[in-house]
Amino acid sequence: MSTVSRSVDIPPPRRGRRELVEDTGVRLGLHIKSAEQAMMAAKTEALRRFGLTVAQYAAMLSLYYVPEQSSAQLARAAAVTPQTMATVIAKLEQKRLVTRHPSSDHAKVLIASLTTEGEALLLRADKVARRIEQRMAESFTVKERQQLTEMLGRVTSLLRDNLIAE
């Protein structure tokens, strides 16, 4: 088992191309963001033929797994702001892919559900989205996928728990 390094020197910005390559090489956030952007671009392109954005797809997928969710719940599941999710859900409702009704617990909260058309479209779109996930997964061994998942989970927990050292 490897030990976790608590002493890492992230240098301040320096001028020069070589320095840029050296310095950005140790900034994990840039690597994580680059991978996320590449994945989002691939999914955006794949979902375009279905008339869906990645956020719409994520909301619909969440509703498929767990029907009857509020906009706030869907925002958390899709990793977008509540304001963005309100727009996403409104657009899906206009397309007749989701319906909303008042919550039985809180009359001001609207609960979203997939329509039959929404579920059918999601399942077709998910086939292409899963191919992207499959290609990513196949580029790692089982052990590497487990390690990557654990490491990304560690970063996520660290940042969500506000344990950022200043």
Image: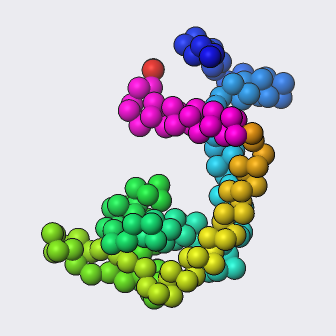
Residue at the spot 69% in from the left edge and 46% down from the top edge: 35
Relative to residue 15, is residue 135 depicted above or below? below
Relative to residue 79, is residue 122 depicted above or below? below
Residue 146 falls within the magenta-colored stretch? yes
Single out the residue that lies furthest toward the top.
7
Whole-percent x and y of residue 82?
37, 61
Along the horizontal axis of the image, is 163 left or right of 148?
A: left
Whole-percent x and y of residue 79?
47, 55
- In the image, 64 versus 89, the foreground residue is 64
Chain part drawn in magenta: 142-164
Q: Is residue 29 visible?
A: no
Whole-percent x and y of residue 1?
62, 16
Q: Is residue 104 visible?
A: yes
- In the image, 152 versus 38, the foreground residue is 152
Whole-percent x and y of residue 89?
42, 75
Residue at the spot 63% in from the left edge and 75% down from the top edge: 125
Residue 125 falls within the magenta-colored stretch? no
The number of discs equals: 0
Q: Quadrant of the C terminus?
A: top left
Along the horizontal axis of the image, is 3 left or right of 131?
A: left
Along the horizontal axis of the image, is 123 left or right of 141?
A: left
Residue at the spot 31% in from the left edge and 67% down from the top edge: 70
The picture quadrant where one finds residue 159 is top left
Q: Main secondary structure of the magenta part?
A: helix
Relative to residue 80, is residue 85 depicted above or below? below
